[in-house]
Amino acid sequence: MDKRHSLTWQQTLLAVGVIVACALWFWNPKSQSPSWIYPYFSGAANLGLDLAWRVDISGFADFEGMTYTQQMDYRFSRAEPGNLAPYSVLDKGYVFVIWIAQTVLFWLAPIKACIWLQILFHVTSSLWVAGRLGSRRQQVIFTLAYAVNPVVLHFVTFAYYYYWQVIPALAWLWYETRQGVITSRGLYLLALVLAAAFLLRQSTIIVSLFILAYAAWRHKRIAAWGAVVCFIAFAMFAKPPSQPWHTAYVGIGAYPNDAGIELDDESGYRMFRDKVGIQIDTTPPNGNFYDEKVRGQYYVVLKERLTSYAKEHPMHLMRNAVLNVLQGFSVGYPVGHPVLAYASAFLGLAVLSLLVFFRMYVTITIVLLSMLGFVVYYPPIPAYMFGNYLLLSLALTRLCDQVGNSEYVVAFGRYLKERL
């Protein structure tokens, strides 16, 4: 890492003002489906000392009938024990983020409090990263590419767990800025942070495990591997009951296919209904999707159909995987825009080629691993690959320096100067 170029307090205040202003300007006016957002906020409102996830059965109908503007002002309240039902389908960690937000920013309605907590964390983390860059040019590039980027702010101001996928990227930067030197206590702290990231989004497990194992290997002490073992044990204990078959099946619909599959949850539900005659209902917490037998049958049916499709069209799935990987080095997969999807893949190929040319192999590894948990079968839509934006923005700052200092670029500049 280059020598740090710290921000002055005037620059810090200016940066805070600009980032917050851009967050307000590009504030995301959309929300996740009530079926998925309600369990989190109801669960946070009813969180007890046992930390169990329980959802108010009686409140969903009213919440679902509201506009998003009305939902943002909705005050989730504690329900009577008889109205609470256990919930365990999604990743649990975001319940705790919401609880922290509504506790710290108690004067705001829970959804607004959660979004503002994410904005505050985004501002703080962006300034922290900028303070660790080696030049003003790098800081400006990073600010434009990440801190005030509308694509990034689209998820910062979105009340769902997608934004928090940035944690492993921040953890890696923290480790990297220490030049790979870390104490045993710091290693266990790193494991704790990455465990929190897994609790928020289980797809972060691969990159988190790599970061932790790499740090333990560099630490050169057997005791350091205890942190890796603890992380693996926690992941096995805390893993939610969801399976990848639904995501893998609808992921085929990201590109033209012979089965008429669309990149839409309803595509999977429709196939299941046509196959066994059961209509999936995701209404929490009593819809049949939360019945373990129905959900298990649903996964089996999708797994069988996906397996048969893979045998019939292996080259299609291979093409999809290659396009997905390349888009992961770009802006991701633009849903509903197939031409832009191929353009994104081409841009990703260019970025990946530059990273290889300048031997930025560690960056390539981290970016790949951060999306390896899904990219083989599902396109890297921005919501899924959010953690990559920080990594790619940092790579961009370094690529600009590398290209600017490249002997080929310098020689070409001299050539132009002589000719002109």
Image (spheres, helix red, strand yellow):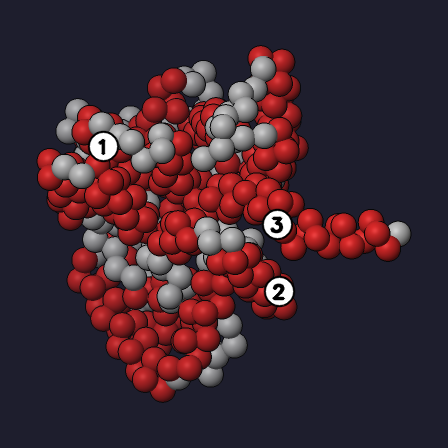
Q: Secondary structure at mark 2?
A: helix
What residue is shown at x 41% (from left), y 76% (from top)?
Answer: 318
Q: Classify residue 301 by image quadrant.
A: bottom left
Identified by mark 1, the residue type is Leu
Q: Is residue 357 visible?
A: yes
Disc 3: which residue:
406
Residue position for label 1: 187
Horizontal side of residue 307 vs 364, given as left or right = left
Question: In which quadrant is the N terminus drawn?
Answer: top left
Closer to the camera: disc 1 or disc 2?
A: 1
The answer to whether residue 85 shows anywhere in this view is: no
Looking at the image, is mark 1 or mark 2 earlier in the sequence?
A: 1
Is 381 located above or below residue 191 in the figure?
Answer: below
Q: Under tag 1, what secondary structure?
A: helix
Report the residue marked by disc 2.
343
| Pointer 1 with pointer 3, Cβ within 8 A | no
